[in-house]
Image (cartoon, rainbow, N blue to C red):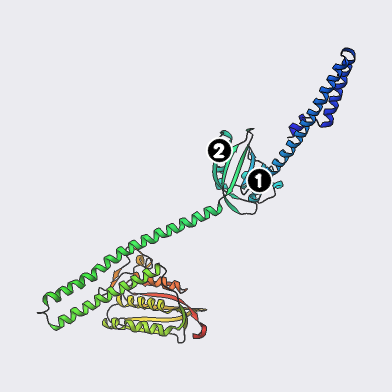
């Protein structure tokens, strides 16, 4: 627009030129032309003058429209949600819009003539340099993704699109902040990885359980086959022994299926957490009574040493399941006639630790670090061939953590094991 205005004179200048031309023609007309020709020339000049005035008015309208268009362009340029920059060949910022300056964290006046690469983190500098080099070596649109650190020490993940300008000395780049998009992609990727891991654990667990279920069912079927074929010839003592074995196998299968169902419900989020304040000793005693008959069959005794009046705020069903699994394991992996000890004590403010210990076969160091994970060596056999899949320990970990505690194990192979878990302490039964 300025170029057009420089080439065109304003109305007053045009008039001066027109008057000058009129005078020169009048001089000629006095010497060479007749009066009628002079009048004709004056008429032509007047028409020409009007034409120039009309052209000038049209130019003024065009100038106004151009100014309005420029104003709209500037508004769109500055209000765009995308950062726009113009860079020189060495990466110096020549021009940028409001969004671009906000991304870089500085006022535009402080960013002019700065090097854009200053805001690119070191790991992305080579990517940006290659991107800038390709823009100036080709006439095609180039793109890249780089990490930026703005003046407010905020890290941004950005997508850059650039193209060389018409004069070939500069390039135009737009910047899109894709930080939130990348964070969302990372969350989705992590969730996918978790799902893959859970599916792998589930498949592995089911494979282990299928194998471990086969043994008790095989024994069960074998005993029923003996009863079916030889019931008429075997004596009462043999029948009693077979019945005891059947019951033992049935209990093992029942516990396995019960743990499997609990674990399945836990994984699907169907186990509702219902904490209440209870006397810890009462819950432990109930759990011992549930398993006392099984311990008696191996001539084992269960000793309880717990401080009186220890109240905990827990989901009672989860706590009972945890205790039953740990006590049951202690019975299985202890030899006939041994003692199992259960204790509870305050270890720090408002934290109680419960310990279930035995002097049984113990656990190897290799297996000790894998007790609360799904792995191929999840299950094992008790001292008298009792089935143990290890699924109960997975449940214990889930239940203890659900109640805000932690579970751990200590063991020396051949000397016994200790399982310890913590619970949040409550002051009394009225703390609900």
Determine the residue positioned at 37% across, 78% down.
357
> Could you give the CA–CA distance between mark 2 and mark 1, rounded to whole angstroms?
22 Å
Q: Which mark is residue 76?
A: 1
Q: Residues within 10 Å of mark 1 (few under 14, many from 20)?
A: few
Quarter of the figure with residue 6 = top right
> In terms of sequence position, does the residue under pointer 2 or pointer 1 come before the other?
1
Figure check: 369 above or below 34: below
Task: From the top left corner, tell me how far across and down residue 254 is, in percent.
Answer: 29, 74
Residue at (52% x, 53% y) in the render: 182
Residue located beneath label 2 in the image:
141
Foreground label between 2 and 1: 1
Residue 17 lies left or right of residue 156; in this view the side is: right
User: Residue 165 lies in what quarter of the image?
Assistant: top right
Which residue lies at the image location 36% right of the left edge and 67% below the top edge? 365
Q: Nearer the viewer, residue 162 or 406?
A: 162
Residue 262: x percent and y percent? 36, 72
From the viewer's perspective, is residue 303 above or below residue 184?
below
Q: Residues within 10 Å of mark 2 (few under 14, many from 20)?
A: few
Q: Position of residue 274 (x, y in %)?
A: 45, 77
């Amino acid at each position: 627009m300025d170029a057009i205005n420089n080439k065109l004179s304003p109305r007053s200048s045009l008039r001066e030129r027109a008057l000058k031309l009129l005078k020169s023609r009048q001089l000629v007309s006095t010497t060479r032309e007749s009066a009628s020709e002079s009048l004709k020339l004056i008429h032509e000049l007047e028409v020409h003058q009007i034409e120039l005035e009309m052209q000038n008015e049209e130019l003024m309208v065009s100038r106004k429209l151009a100014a309005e268009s420029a104003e709209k362009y500037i508004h769109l340029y500055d209000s765009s949600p995308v950062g726009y920059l113009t860079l020189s060949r060495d990466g110096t910022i020549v021009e940028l819009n409001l969004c671009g300056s906000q991304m870089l964290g500085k006022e535009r006046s402080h960013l002019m003539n700065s090097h854009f690469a200053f805001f690119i983190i070191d790991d992305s500098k080579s990517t940006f340099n290659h991107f800038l080099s390709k823009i100036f070596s080709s006439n095609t649109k180039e793109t890249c993704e780089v990490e930026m650190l703005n003046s407010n020490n905020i890290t941004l993940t950005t997508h850059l699109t650039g193209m060389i300008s018409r004069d070939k000395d500069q390039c135009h780049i737009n910047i899109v902040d894709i930080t939130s998009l990348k964070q969302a992609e990372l969350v989705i990727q992590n969730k996918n990885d978790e799902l893959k891991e859970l599916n792998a654990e589930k498949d592995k667990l089911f494979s282990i359980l299928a194998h471990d279920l086969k043994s008790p069912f095989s024994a069960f079927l074998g005993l029923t086959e003996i009863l079916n074929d030889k019931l008429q010839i075997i004596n009462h003592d043999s029948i009693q022994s077979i019945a005891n074995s059947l019951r033992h196998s049935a209990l093992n299968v029942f516990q396995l299926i019960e743990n499997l169902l609990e674990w399945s419900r836990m994984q699907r989020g169907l186990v509702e957490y219902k904490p209440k304040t209870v006397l810890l000793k009462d819950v432990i005693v109930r759990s011992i009574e549930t398993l006392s008959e099984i311990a008696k069959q191996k001539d084992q005794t269960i000793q309880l040493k717990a401080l009186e009046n220890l109240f905990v705020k827990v989901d009672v069903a989860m706590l009972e399941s945890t205790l039953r699994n740990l006590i049951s394991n202690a019975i299985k992996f202890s030899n006939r006639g041994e003692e199992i000890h259960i204790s509870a004590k305050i270890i720090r403010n408002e934290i109680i630790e419960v310990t279930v210990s035995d002097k049984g076969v113990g656990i190897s160091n290799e297996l000790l670090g894998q007790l609360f994970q799904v792995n191929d060596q999840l299950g094992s056999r008790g001292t008298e061939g009792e089935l143990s899949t290890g699924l109960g320990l997975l449940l214990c970990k889930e239940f203890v953590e659900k109640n805000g505690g932690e579970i751990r194990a200590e063991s020396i192979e051949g000397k016994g094991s200790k399982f310890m878990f913590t619970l949040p302490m409550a002051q009394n039964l009225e703390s609900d």
